[in-house]
Image: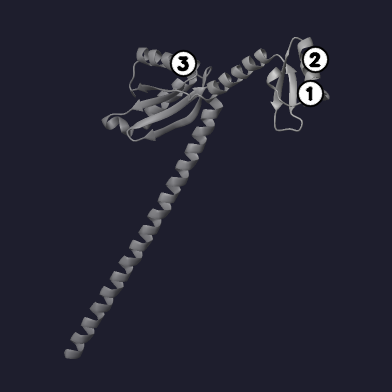
Amino acid sequence: MNDRIRSREVRLVGQDGEQIGIRSLAQALNMAQDSGLDLVEVADNANPPVCRIMDYGKFKYEQSQKAKEARKKATTVSVKEMKYRPKIGVGDFNTKTSKVEKFLGEGSKVKVTIMFRGREQQHPELGRRILDDVADAVAHVGRIEIYPKLDGRNMVMVLVPGQGTRRQREEAVAIETERAAEVAAEEATAMETDEAVLTEETTTEEAVKTEETTAEETTTEETA
């Protein structure tokens, strides 16, 4: 920068990015000083090196801000968790859901977990209903990233900051219903195949027994 530049000639770029052309180092320095700015070497590998007239202090500040913004965007998003019970009361539901709304407003993801106990696991629709209610309540600040699904004894859903819609959830339900129907059809086909095999085996066994009985009767008649 400025008098630290060693080349006798430089390819000069003006403050606004305009190409001035090749100038002696002395000329370039004078032009920068006349403008109250700095002469900064921006491409020392070029021949001659490329230098630009600029406010170096302002340039460094802008670079620092860009780097800071990049680090901010690269920061890992925190994940909060809120747990509900299938038979939660209205007061507890509202309190927990308010916290979910707060977390989303702060930019955090939220994992919403329904904890089933004992026979409650036989009624996953209760958990699904609560998760739908939570998603509806915070739709103005959060949208569904991972739709409700069973995870061991629990049912989970993940929300992220942003606006969600009921249509998204309805589409997800339709997809899940279609998948469930496909699974049921596959299971029914497998069951029919097993029954057919079992029927065939039974018929074969009966045929063998009939042949054995006929053979025994024939032998008895011949002996008589």
**Percent position of residue 183, x then y:** 44, 46
Instruction: Categorize mark 1 by other alpha carbons within 10 Å: few (<14), some (14-19), many (20+).
Output: many
**Percent position of residue 193, x then y:** 40, 58
Q: Report the Cα–Cα distance between label 2 and label 3.
A: 58 Å
* Image quadrant where residue 21 sits: top right
Q: Amino acid at mark 2?
A: Met
Residue 1 is at least partly visible in this image: no
* Picture residue at 45% right of the left edge, 48% below the top: 185
* Picture residue at 20% right of the left edge, 86% below the top: 219
In this view, the mark in front (2 or 3): 2
Q: Amino acid at mark 1?
A: Leu
Residue 198 is at least partly visible in this image: yes
**Callout 2–callout 1 Cβ contact below 8 Å:** yes
Q: Earlier in the sequence, mark 3 or mark 1?
A: 1
Q: Report the Cα–Cα distance between label 3 and label 1.
A: 55 Å
Q: Left or right: 74 with respect to 66?
A: left
- Where the C terminus falls, by quadrant? bottom left
| Marking on residue 101 | 3
* Picture residue at 47% right of the left edge, 22% below the top: 135
- Where the N terminus falls, by quadrant? top right
| Marking on residue 12 | 1
**Nearer to the camera, 132 or 10:** 10
Q: Amino acid at mark 3?
A: Glu
**Nearer to the camera, 215 or 112:** 112
Q: Earlier in the sequence, mark 2 or mark 3?
A: 2
* Picture residue at 28% right of the left edge, 29% below the top: 117
Which colour assignment does the render follow? Answer: one colour
Residue that label 2 marks:
31
**Percent position of residue 91, x then y:** 36, 12
Q: Left or right: 49 with respect to 93?
A: right
The relative height of residue 200 versus residue 93 in the rendered view (above or below) is: below
